[in-house]
Amino acid sequence: MQQLGWLLVLLGAMIVLLGVILMVFPSIPWLGRLPGDIVLEGKNWRVYFPLATSLLLSVILSVLLSLWMRWFH
């Protein structure tokens, strides 16, 4: 039960850190406008597919999770 408590504390700290980062940097100028992102526009509509952004975030989160698992297990 103690390990679960520490896990919840760490998870909460990470959420707080993410919140502070989002407050300090409300938008990252290049995020969402990568070369692989697809934007379809018409006269009165726009459809946005952030493919490259999704892949980049997936790779970054996978690396961070892999490092986390190696250090703490």
Image (cartoon, rainbow, N blue to C red):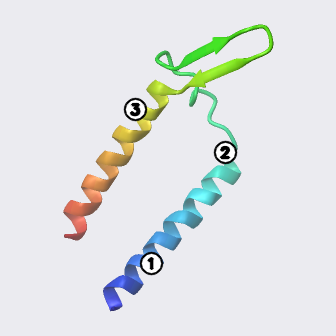
Q: Which mark is residue 65?
A: none
Find numbered disc 2 in the image and state the secondary structure of the residue it sits on: loop
- For marks 1 and 2, the one nearer the N-term is 1
Name the amino acid, label 3: Leu
Residue sitting at the far top: 43
Q: Position of residue 5 (x, y in %)?
A: 41, 86
Around disc 3, counting alpha carbons within 10 Å, would you say few (fewer than 14), some (14 to 19), or many (20 or more)? few
Mark 1: secondary structure: helix
Residue at screen point 39% across, 82% down: 6
Task: Give the amino acid type for the residue marked by disc 2 in the picture.
Answer: Phe
**Residue at point 53%, 27% (across, down):** 50
On screen, 14 above or below 30?
below
Is 61 placed left or right of 41 in the picture?
left
The CA span between labels 3 and 1 is 28 Å
Check contact, mark 2 vs mark 3: CB within 8 A. Answer: no
Contact, mark 3 vs mark 1 (Cβ under 8 Å): no
The residue beneath circle 2 is 25
Could you tell me which quadrant the N terminus lies in? bottom left
Q: Which label sits in the foreground, 2 or 3?
A: 3
Q: Quadrant of the C terminus?
A: bottom left
Residue 40: x and y, percent? 62, 13
Left or right of residue 54, residue 16 in this image:
right
Q: Is residue 53 above or below residue 9?
A: above
Return the x and y of residue 58 as percentages of the image width and height: 38, 40
- Report the residue marked by disc 1: 8
Question: Which circle marks residue 55 in the picture?
Answer: 3
Could you give the CA–CA distance between mark 2 and mark 3, rounded to whole angstroms? 21 Å
